[in-house]
Amino acid sequence: MKLETLAILNAERAARRAAILLSDLDDGGQRVVREAQIGDDPLADLLTRHLLSGKSGLVTIEGRQVFLTVQVPPVRLVVIGAVHISQALCPMAAALDLSVSVIDPRTAFATPDRFPGTTLVTQWPDEAFASSVPPLDRYCALVALTHDPKIDDPALIAALKAQCFYVGALGSRKTHARRVERLTEAGFSAAEVGRIAAPIGLDIGAVSPAEIAVSILAQIVASQRKSSAGQVAGTPGQAAGSSSQVSGGA
Amino acid sequence: MLSAETDILKAAESWRRDGRQVALATVVETWGSAPRPVGSHLVVDEDGNFLGSVSGGCVEGAVITEGLEAIADGHPRVIEFGVADETAWRVGLSCGGRIRVFVERID
């Protein structure tokens, strides 16, 4: 491999953009396709499928063996609210290799005792995104769990703008209806607001905080892996909310 | 897992920029119960220093040797490992799987 090719891969990774390296195993020929170029590539369909799955693999192209090294940025989970559900959610998310940060300005909630080993940010979401937490992007999932619009809404707005692949918000249908009104007033389209998973989580009849955490994480994994939902994460340059595959749980 | 693979690619780049000769090995195909998934990397320099793994220890020695040869001759190559009777413990996979590994020099 040429050093320049390797450098491109590493640079794309550092910038949290996906890329695929194609290696011809017969002659060693290689090229990198950046995420933004995939749509225009002659192998667009094949590359898109691999990008969505996030999996490297061997394919045969015109009788030649080609290995696709699929490089997708590590998924980050941003949790708004250092609440009971979050306490159950954080260790489970870590087991899924998600990199987790919890944001909650209420210092009584966001204590290291309650969240051992988790990155805690005791700031308002807008302050946090402007300083302590890396900017949101399409490889982030954001879950808003405080029930408090003062804290949840700014985070949801930031997540929709950044086209996070998953945006979920806790609250009853009634609570969510009011949330929809506020976000609509703030200028978001129905399609954009429709991207918010609410009530949050897959409908598995979850009751306890741990069960709700399971339903939320299952929904996040589905958004990431299932091809219909994955388009949110895998199709570059889409207008925010132009595909609303992430539907509510119930 | 993914981030670890990237650390290896970062190391490969920085080793090369430091003037070291470097080869990269990538698991391209697995059958059966292979210990490391497709896409796993190992990087080796001309002195045999290496990072990463392609099999969890079973065939690393042989892959490093191939890496050194790729550094010497510049030819990319694909090598296959599996369980082969008495060689199983030498350069095979005790788990019973088979793997193919692409080895290339960083130029």
Image (cartoon, coloured by chain):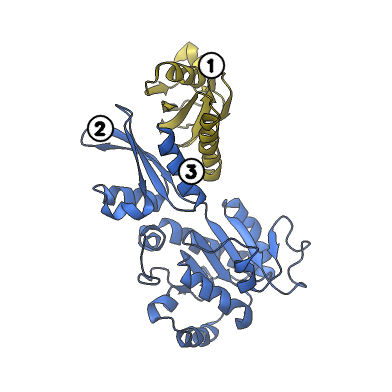
Chain colours: A blue, B yellow
Depth-wise, is mark 1 or mark 3 nearer the camera? Answer: 3
Percent across and percent down for residue A164 are 48, 65
Look at discs 2 and 1 and give the one toward the viewer.
2
Residue at figure coordinates x 78%, y 73% from the top left: A108
Mark 1 and mark 2 in contact (Cβ < 8 Å)?
no
Residue for point 56% across, 69% down: A143
Image point (42%, 49%), residue name: A54
How crowded pointer 1 is (Cα within 10 Å; few <14, some 14-19, many 20+) is rated as few
Q: Nearer the viewer, residue A161 or A108?
A: A161
Name the residue beneath numbered marker 3.
A10
What residue would you read off at disc 2?
A64
Q: Chain of mark 1?
A: B
Q: Residue A74: give x, y in percent of width and height.
A: 52, 51
**Within the image, what quadrant is residue A81 found in?**
bottom right
Q: How many marks?
A: 3
Instruction: Tell me residue A73's x, y (percent).
Output: 49, 51
Position of A31 with respect to B107 (left or right) is left
Q: Mark 2 belongs to which subunit?
A: A
The residue lying furthest to the left in this view is: A62
Give the SS element for disc 3. helix
Q: Position of residue B60 (x, y in %)?
A: 53, 23
Q: Label 1: state its secondary structure.
A: helix
Quadrant including the N terminus of chain A: top left
Same chain for the residues at labels 1 and 3, yes or no? no
Q: CA distance from mark 2 to mark 1?
A: 33 Å
**Discs 3/2, front:** 3
The residue at which mark 1 appears reads as B89
Amino acid type indicated by mark 1:
Trp
Residue A172 higher or lower than B88, as above or below: below
Res B84 seen here = yes
